[in-house]
């Protein structure tokens, strides 16, 4: 009974800390450091479709720590990431979007570190701006990357 409660408490803690990964598709990866035991260190490229803007995909490249800790999911990945967002089809909005909101998040350590992508709207230029950064419970990183997707003037961005 105690083990069951401990498992439930652990699961609640992990879910509360955002353990679940963002909805992404891995496009590919390259090895950067060979490891004798466990997976190699690598750079991974993932694709994220914006859940509220059809026709926009963001590609995020980030470091993925290998070795024994990386293989067990216990390693903390580096904070550096790069983003490129593109119109991959006709851009559309099912509903008005916020001026600024987080659209993707993925954990980069077991509990405390996350990679985040925030969408901002530049209404003057009718452009969607995406920024990626990493944060921690105590201290984040100032390292970031920005990408912009211009929306045709014939499709004004509906902002809440």
Image (spheres, grey):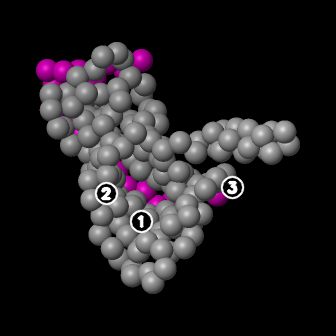
Image spot of residue 7 (x, y percent): 74, 43
Q: Quadrant of the N terminus?
A: top right
Image spot of residue 29 (x, y percent): 30, 64
Q: Nearer the viewer, mark 2 or mark 3?
A: 2
* Quadrant of the image occupied by residue 88: top left
Q: Residue at x 44, y 81 (%)?
A: 35
Q: Nearer the viewer, mark 3 or mark 1?
A: 1
Q: Over which residues does the magenta segment extend? A: 138-160
Most prominent secondary structure in the magenta stretch? loop
Image spot of residue 139 (x, y percent): 64, 58
Q: Residue at x 44, y 32 (%)?
A: 100
Crowding at dot 2, Cα within 10 Å, few <14 / some 14-19 / many 20+, comes out as many
Looking at the image, can residue 17 be seen? yes
Using the image, determine if residue 93 lies above or below residue 127: above
Mark 2 sits on what residue? 45
Q: Secondary structure at mark 1?
A: strand
**Residue found at the far front of this picture:** 1
Viewer-nearest residue: 40 or 121? 40
């Amino acid at each position: 009974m105690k083990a069951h409660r401990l498992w439930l408490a652990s699961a609640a803690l992990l879910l509360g800390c955002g353990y679940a990964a963002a909805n992404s598709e891995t496009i590919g990866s390259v090895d950067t450091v060979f490891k004798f035991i466990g997976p190699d260190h690598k750079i991974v490229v993932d694709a994220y479709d914006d859940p509220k803007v059809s026709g926009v995909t963001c590609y995020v490249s980030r470091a993925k720590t290998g070795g024994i800790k990386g293989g067990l999911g216990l390693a903390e990945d580096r904070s550096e990431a790069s983003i490129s967002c593109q119109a991959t089809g006709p851009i559309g909005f099912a509903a008005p979007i916020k001026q600024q909101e987080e659209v993707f998040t993925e954990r980069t350590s077991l509990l405390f570190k996350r990679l985040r992508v925030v969408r901002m709207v530049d209404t003057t230029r009718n452009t969607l701006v995406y920024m990626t950064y990493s944060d921690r419970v105590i201290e984040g990183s100032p390292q970031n990357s920005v990408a912009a997707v211009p929306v045709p003037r014939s499709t004004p961005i509906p902002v809440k």
